[in-house]
Amino acid sequence: MANAPIDPLTHYLLLAVGVLGSVACYTTISRLFAPPAEPDESDLSRLAKKEVGTSSAFSSLNPNGGALERLDLFLLRTFHLDVKLEELHMMMGRPAKPTPLDMLHLKEFFAAAFGGLAYLGTGSLFGLLFGVVGFLVPDSIFNGRVRARQSDIMRNFPTTVDLLALTIEAGLDYMAAIERILKNVKSEQRTELEKEFEKVINEVQLGYTRRDALKRLAMRTGVAEIRSFVGLIIQSDELGTSLVELLRNYAADMRFRRLNKAEKLAAQASTKMLIPLFIFIFPTVFIMMLAPMMKSLIQGGLGF
């Protein structure tokens, strides 16, 4: 007796179960045989949890609460999203909105929207897998905000380093120099970099060592130039070298690299302009040049 053909819906359902089962098996085996991770006190995840005056953004979730809270806790525990979302929130400068919980809800909303629309469009349960894509879409939004904040920090960084070197040369140490720079700027007019320096001052006043406060500054911003800047200050403290010359040379090097980057982008502009030229400009020019000729040809020849 011949086997009955498989219904398309059943086929897609079995395919989805097979894919998800394979992913689950791989994840389980990799976790069983993976060596235990060694704790790293300088890791961003620990920094996000040890930020001064803050607690976990997900501590208010009740395991016995509603369906949404249970879903939140399931996703946080299964995919370890609590650490990742708190890191992203910290790298964004800890804005009031969105909070890490809002970020999780946004990911859930996009997952439901993508999966629901794909299901309605295809009429197959296989379309629900597009919810995974929707779940990852908000990450690009959050990362975009992080990059925008880092660009704002770097925009003012060379000038701030020059001011810091000038103030240190006047006889102050670097912490007093940072305080002096901040006093000359109103709180509501401070840039992201100045807000981060203010956090460094507050942490030192709360009992952190200068070295730890500076390292936390580098990790909160996630900018390579800030990490190099912190390394220069720590090295100067340890070796007793002149911090003024180091900062001046570093500021000059940053400006030189910024100039090189601008020249590189300018050199790439001509190549990038070819795409809009071929898509928008050239077709329009050809139409304007050839349209009268084509019209004359269609109406009765070329006229000679």
Image (cartoon, rainbow, N blue to C red):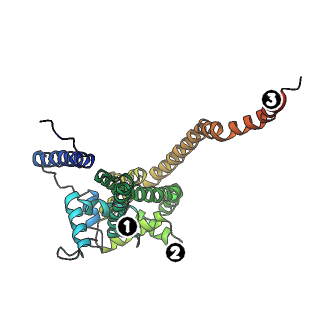
The x, y position of residue 263, in whole percent, is 59, 40
**Real-space CA distance between mark 2 and mark 3, rounded to the nearest whole angstrom:** 69 Å
Identify the amino acid type marked 3.
Leu
In the image, taking residue 99 as reference, residue 20 lies left or right, namely left
Q: How crowded is mark 1: few (under 14 residues within 10 Å), some or many (20 or more)?
A: many
Residue at 15% from the left image edge and 38% from the top image edge:
3
* Figure check: 24 above or below 153: above
State the residue in front, 237 or 69: 69
Extreme residue toward the front, this view: 1
Extreme residue toward the top, this view: 304
Q: Where does label 1 land, which residue?
A: 200
Residue at 50% from the left image edge and 75% from the top image edge:
187
N-terminal of the two: label 2 or label 1?
Answer: 2
State the residue in front, 246 or 298: 298
**Real-space CA distance between mark 3 and mark 1, rounded to the nearest whole angstrom:** 77 Å
Identify the amino acid type marked 1.
Val
Question: Which secondary structure, mark 2?
Answer: helix
Residue contact at pointers 2 and 3, CB within 8 angstroms: no
N-terminal of the two: label 2 or label 3?
Answer: 2
Identify the amino acid type marked 2.
Glu
The x, y position of residue 177, in whole percent, is 46, 66
The x, y position of residue 153, in whole percent, is 48, 59
Q: Residues within 10 Å of mark 3 (few under 14, many from 20)?
A: few
Q: Where does label 2 land, which residue?
A: 188
Q: Where does label 3 land, which residue?
A: 297
Extreme residue toward the right, this view: 304
